[in-house]
């Protein structure tokens, strides 16, 4: 996997929905856009999964891969139709401007529960945009889950098996 979003960056969304994408994430978006070249701006797609408290952002290649996964379902199957509606129909294709900003629609900002203060979080082949408070709550819950699964006192979180 060439495209890897990682890290966490706090930012702000203005009242018109404009937000600056972190520089490191822009570089990954450029790698994941086959139409990108010097003097052009990278493309991305923003979507909201039902019941998820954030937005997910994919590079052009990442969104194309999601579409290929959906296309593997039989035509007119309930799964394909549902995924097409939610993923493809509900996504917002965007292109970075010259300053690295995008405008996220009000509909998506509301669906993702985003306020003014947000957190960009790398998540391998995508990144997420969280409301800062929701992100802190979700991170605490995930840490509690992880503490049940991993022994943090053991090297690398696991006891060696013999």
Image (cartoon, rainbow, N blue to C red):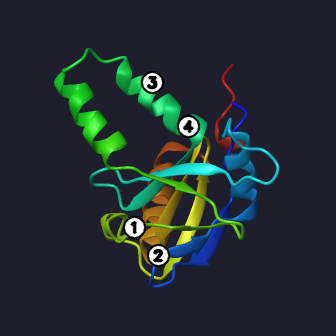
Kind of element beneath mark 4? helix
**Residue 68 tag number:** 3
Residue furthest to the right:
38
Mark 1 to mark 2 CA distance (whole Å): 6 Å
**Residue 105 tag number:** 1
Residue furthest to the front:
39
Label 1 Cα neighbours within 10 Å, binned few <14 / some 14-19 / many ≥20: some
The reply to whether callout 1 and callout 2 are in contact (CB within 8 Å) is yes
Label 2 Cα neighbours within 10 Å, binned few <14 / some 14-19 / many ≥20: some
* Residue at (19% x, 20% y) in the render: 77
Q: Is residue 17 above or below residue 31?
A: below
Label 4 Cα neighbours within 10 Å, binned few <14 / some 14-19 / many ≥20: some
* Residue at (30% x, 35% y) in the render: 84
**N-terminal label among 3 and 2:** 2
Horizontal side of residue 81 vs 19, given as left or right? left
The reply to whether callout 4 and callout 2 are in contact (CB within 8 Å) is no
- Reading the image, the residue beneath label 4 is 62
**N-terminal label among 4 and 2:** 2
Kind of element beneath mark 2? loop
**N-terminal label among 1 and 4:** 4
Mark 3 to mark 4 CA distance (whole Å): 10 Å
- Reading the image, the residue beneath label 2 is 17
**N-terminal label among 3 and 4:** 4
């Amino acid at each position: 996997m060439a495209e890897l979003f990682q890290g966490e960056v706090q930012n702000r969304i203005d009242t018109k929905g404009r937000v600056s994408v972190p520089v490191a994430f822009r570089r990954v978006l450029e790698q994941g856009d086959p139409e990108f070249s010097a003097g052009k701006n990278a493309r991305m797609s923003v979507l909201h999964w039902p019941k998820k408290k954030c937005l997910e952002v994919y590079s052009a290649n990442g969104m194309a891969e999601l579409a290929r996964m959906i296309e593997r379902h039989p035509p007119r199957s309930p799964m394909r139709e549902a995924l097409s509606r939610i993923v493809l129909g509900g996504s917002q294709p965007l292109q970075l401007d010259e300053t690295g900003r995008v405008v996220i629609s009000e509909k998506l900002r509301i669906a993702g529960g985003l306020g003014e203060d947000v957190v960009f979080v790398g998540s391998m082949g995508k990144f997420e945009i969280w409301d800062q408070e929701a992100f802190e709550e979700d991170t605490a819950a995930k840490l509690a889950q992880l503490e049940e699964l991993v022994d943090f006192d053991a090297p690398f979180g696991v006891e060696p098996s013999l």
